[in-house]
Image (tube, grey):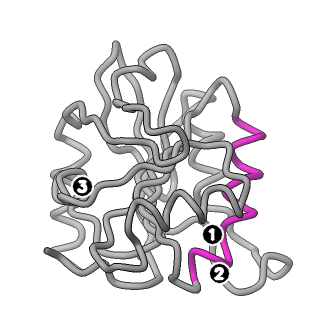
Amino acid sequence: MLLCVLVTTFLKAQEIQNFSLTDVRDRKSVNLNQFSSLKGVAIIFTSNSCPFDQYYINRIKNLSEIYSGRIQILLVNSHPETEESEEVMSQYANEQNLQVPYLADKKQQVLTQFNARKSPEVFLLKNASAKFSVVYHGMIDNNAQSESDVTEHYLKDAIDQLLAGEKIEPAETRPVGCSIRRN
């Protein structure tokens, strides 16, 4: 637990460096700096095949619609397995009718920068003068398997607090999901 707190504290203090990844939906490059006009960016490490990601896909779509134009949601797939290839990611994006960038991080550069370990795992970034820093890290909500039984909407609450200029509480929760294998 102490290590997790230290990593999160380090990330919060650290400015997140710009990155550029390919969006498998249209093969265009997406970089963090292109969202400098928004108040924040939610980066969600995800996959095509983890059951936890499947449980959350509709909730992610809903959040994207609710906060469109204010917070950008980026889905990042860093899983190296064959079933997570860019081609399969593209098919998945079409099947799910994803309207948010679905970014391939197969060299795991963004994964390494954030030290992400799970899928799904969220990092909410605050934009301060085109400099991004982590203000929330953890899970989307407190019930992956049953949306109707959710009692804590951690990511939504953090986004609302960010947009209102309030302190993010809680600033961290323990992510649950599938482990991301390192190359």
| Place of residue 115 in the rendered image (x, y in percent of width and height, measured from the top left) | 21, 63
**Residue 13 located left or right of residue 59:** left
| Place of residue 178 in the rendered image (x, y in percent of width and height, measured from the top left) | 42, 85
Report the disc number at residue 141: 1
Do callouts 2 and 3 mark residues in contact (Cβ within 8 Å)?
no
N-term-proximal mark, 2 vs 3: 3
Q: Main secondary structure of the magenta part?
A: helix
Taking the spot 36% from the left edge, 54% from the top edge, the residue there is 104
Res. 173 image quadrant: bottom left
The mark tally for this picture is 3
Q: Amino acid at mark 2?
A: Ala
Q: Residues within 10 Å of mark 2 (few under 14, many from 20)?
A: many
Res. 116 image quadrant: bottom left
For marks 2 and 3, give the CA distance.
Answer: 22 Å
Q: Which residue is mark 2?
A: 144
Taking the spot 51% from the left edge, 83% from the top edge, the residue there is 50
Front-lying residue, 56 or 135? 56
Q: Is residue 121 above or below residue 97?
A: below
Q: Which residue is mark 3?
A: 114
Res. 52 image quadrant: bottom right
| Place of residue 128 in the rendered image (x, y in percent of width and height, measured from the top left) | 36, 20
Do callouts 2 and 1 mark residues in contact (Cβ within 8 Å)?
yes
- Secondary structure under the numbered disc 3 in the rendered image: helix
